[in-house]
Amino acid sequence: MDGLQHVRNLKAWISRNLGGAAAEDGAVREQARNLAVAALLVEVLRADYDVSGQERRQVLESIRGVLGLEEAQCEELLVEAEQQVDRAHDLHQFTSEINRAFAHDEKLRLVEQLWRVAHADEIVHKYEEHLIRRVADLLHLPHATFIVAKLRAADLSH
């Protein structure tokens, strides 16, 4: 069972057994959103098949920056995201969650963080760039927004 299906099953169970409690549903949506963000960062982390300590630290920093979580929560989310990515069939399950949860500016900030992960080891591999381009397309971001995020991340990495 993929991560998104697990979230759907959990939502259905909560709805059946707790009468659709809004707070619980909100928590499930927030967890799905957080997992999708972390999973996309992990996808970039692994895109060049060489995971450096710098890149992993950047993923944690990016999770904290995008989601505003505490360090321990970021670590837990990273481990969970790595497991989800191992089971994932494609990017759609993650990007569709982001499309539901994020406004345009939040998507831009996320794509910028994807670039920061790619830049963390000071070498942006063609697989990383291709992956980020695919994510930006799946998030319905115009090419100009993709370039803006790329340039911002490059400026911050120097």
Image: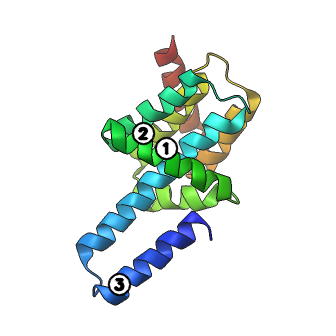
Q: Nearer the viewer, mark 1 or mark 2?
A: 1
Q: Is residue 45 left or right of residue 16?
A: right
Q: Which residue is labeled 1 in the image?
A: 78
Q: Looking at the image, which residue sits at the far top?
A: 158
Q: Which residue is labeled 2 in the image?
A: 63
Q: Position of residue 52 (x, y in %)?
A: 62, 24
Q: Nearer the viewer, mark 1 or mark 3?
A: 1
Q: Is residue 56 visible?
A: yes
Q: Residue at x 42, y 52 (%)?
A: 34
* Badge 2 vs badge 3, beta-carbon distance below 8 Å: no
Q: Position of residue 152 (x, y in %)?
A: 48, 23
- SS class, disc 1: helix
Name the image colouring.
Answer: rainbow
On screen, 11 above or below 96? Answer: below
* Badge 1 vs badge 3, beta-carbon distance below 8 Å: no
Q: Which residue is labeled 3 in the image?
A: 15
Q: Is residue 17 left or right of residue 46?
A: left
Kindly identify the amino acid type of the residue bearing the numbered disc 3. Ser
Q: Position of residue 121 (x, y in %)?
A: 61, 19
* Badge 1 vs badge 2, beta-carbon distance below 8 Å: yes
Q: Residue at x 54, y 19 (%)?
A: 154
